[in-house]
Image: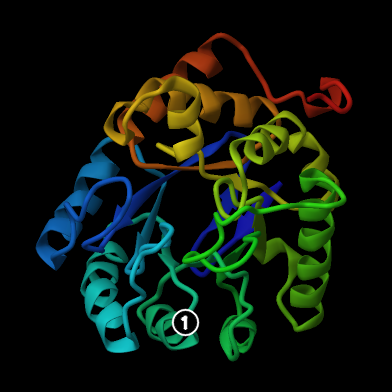
Amino acid sequence: MFWQTTRYRLSLLQPLVMGIVNATPDSFSDGGQHADAASAQSHCDLLLEQGAQILDIGGESTRPGARQPDLAEELARVIPVLRHAVTLGVPVSVDTSRPEVMREALALGVDIVNDVRALARPGALAAVAAHPACGVCLMHMNGEPGVMQSAPRYDAGVVAEVLQWLRLRLADVVASGVAAERITLDPGIGFGKTPAHNWALLQRQHELLALGRPLLVGWSRKSTLGSLTGRAVGERLPASLAAALAAVQRGAHVLRVHDVAATVDALKVWAAAGLTATPHQEGGDRP
């Protein structure tokens, strides 16, 4: 399997590590450590030194209750960082839901649009469909960030509903002219889901492979890991690595992470041990 992006056709025979660059003052995970352009640019360089194979740069925090920046503010946060990142010789992703930001980023040569709202905002799908080759990640989110964690529910079961939602969204995007080879899917761990929902999605993640597209997953430092371990956000590295390897074992192709060096090391051990993703060997419904 591969993922077609603007400048790169990415082989997915081995899992890829996508390093997160939050160019925001209010991220849940790093507290605005890279809010200014110079710091974010330096962080891009560091993540590459640590082994990141993709850089994902975003200017809007999607933690519950975060203030949404206006368009000018989001552009000011991400454009200088993207301009630097596209010179570094790796695929660059922009984490945005705004079509205006997508178009500006793609004009710079950005390779991937990573949208937590799955191109649902007016004009977003058209912006991606108009581009001849950019990659896109479609993520499932139940509600909007400000309210998504207010008693989320899935009457038909979270796995069944996420699977069906991704199937329909994938079909809609392909029908709009975006080739399937340009698309990855993300079940949206922590986006409108309780810890029980998130564990169900991990345990049965292999079922999402039936959609025929690569899976991008983001467990890094998530609150569900804190709920399980009792650890604060800055103390969740071991739990994040365990979740990442569990996701790879169940067929994940791209890991979106904060702790690149540690994740790369964990995957090296995984490969040296001769372990492979074996989704067809997974059991059925597990609690």
Residue 63 in the image: state x and y as whole percent: 41, 57
Side (left or right) of 130 relative to 16: right
Which residue carries the number 1 mark? 98
Residue ranking furthest to the front: 151
Q: Position of residue 76 (x, y in %)?
A: 22, 80
- How crowded pointer 1 is (Cα within 10 Å; few <14, some 14-19, many 20+) is rated as many
Q: Quadrant of residue 265?
A: top left
Q: Residue 123 at x, y = what percent?
A: 58, 90
Q: Is residue 87 visible?
A: yes
Q: Residue furthest left?
A: 38
Answer whether residue 267 is visible to the viewer in this image. no
The answer to whether 248 appears left or right of 258 in the picture is right
Q: Residue visible at 55% across and 68% down?
A: 144
Q: Nearer the viewer, residue 64 or 11?
A: 64
Quarter occupied by residue 268: top left
| 90 with respect to 272 (left or right) | left
- What's the residue at 32%, 85% (across, down)? 70
* Residue in the image at 31% along x and 31% along y: 232
Circle 1: residue type: Arg
**Residue drawn at (35%, 79%), measured in percent from left and top?**
108
Q: Is residue 148 above or below residue 208?
A: below
Question: Residue 187: x, y in percent?
Answer: 66, 50
Q: Quadrant of the C terminus?
A: top right
The answer to which of 170 and 156 lies nearer the viewer is 156
